[in-house]
Amino acid sequence: MRILLVSATTLEIKPLLKHFRFKERIDSQINSYTFNKMDVDVLTTGVGMVPTAYMMGKALARHEYDAAFNLGIAGSFNREIKPGDVIHITHDRFPEIGSDQGEYFLSLIDLKLLEENYFPYRDGQLINDLPIKSKTLNELKTVRGITVNRVHTTNKSIEKIRKRCNPDTESMEGAAFFYSCFSEDVPCAQIRAVSNYVDHRDDDRWNIPKAIENLNKVILTILHE
């Protein structure tokens, strides 16, 4: 079995790597390991949807994978999801692609540049219909995410995106990962740990170490199944 683990930074999956046996360095951003009789390729894309899409394209063109995981941290709009919680994102989208019309935003669908069910979209979203079978994954809270170039830090921007998309979380890579996996028919899961609430930027209220610790514990449990 060959799986692909995808993360924006090494920091987010560093605790996990000590459990793997290094096999070879494929290129500057992907290393190959073995774990429990599985071949595990670890792809570090860099932060953002553009490098994620590009590196995913390279990886999926090079090998066929039985499963792919996107691992990382996320901000939470939902106050019931606390910093440190690990969640399973099953719906994602690119909310910034479109046109501002004063106080209104027109998506590509509104502009008639994209049909809402044009593959791999469904109702304008990327919905994971190729989930990885896992008891641990099934026990995680499932949420709706958005993927952004610029995180939301003002009351006005947060209120507007809540009204338009009603997201639980935001990241900078998730929808690009989904788009790549769905396009190549690769079973996948986007698993993230909440590092902060989506709010005014205040590093003292973030808890990245706890989020990373909990995230790595969960994915290790899934890989042991």
Image: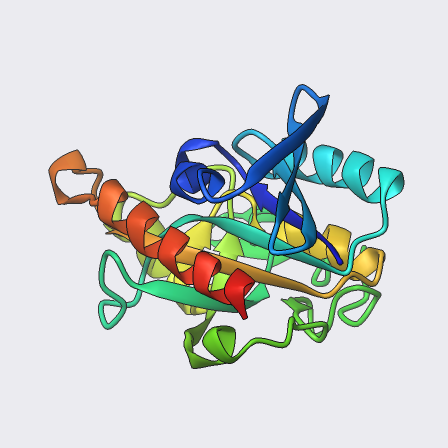
The C terminus, quarter of image: bottom right
User: Does residue 162 appear to the left or right of 155 in the view shown?
Assistant: right
Quadrant where the N terminus sits is: bottom right
Which one is nearer the viewer's eye here, 55 or 165?
A: 55
At a point 25% along the width and 57% down the height, the residue shown is 84
Q: In the image, what residue occupies the spot 60% across and 59% down? A: 93
In the rendered image, which quarter is residue 193 located in? Answer: bottom left
Q: Position of residue 194 (x, y in %)?
A: 32, 55
Q: Percent position (x, y) of residue 121?
A: 75, 66
Q: Please name whichever residue, 182 or 153, is drawn nearer the observer in this view of the structure.
A: 182
Image position of 30 with respect to 63: above or below: above
106 up-or-down from 53: above or below: below
78 up-or-down from 113: above or below = below
x, y percentage for residue 88?
A: 47, 68
Residue 22 percent across, percent down from the top left: 60, 32
Image point 40% across, 33% down: which residue? 11
The quadrant where residue 181 appears: bottom right
Q: Is residue 2 visible?
A: yes
The residue sitting at 63% across, 36% down in the picture is 43
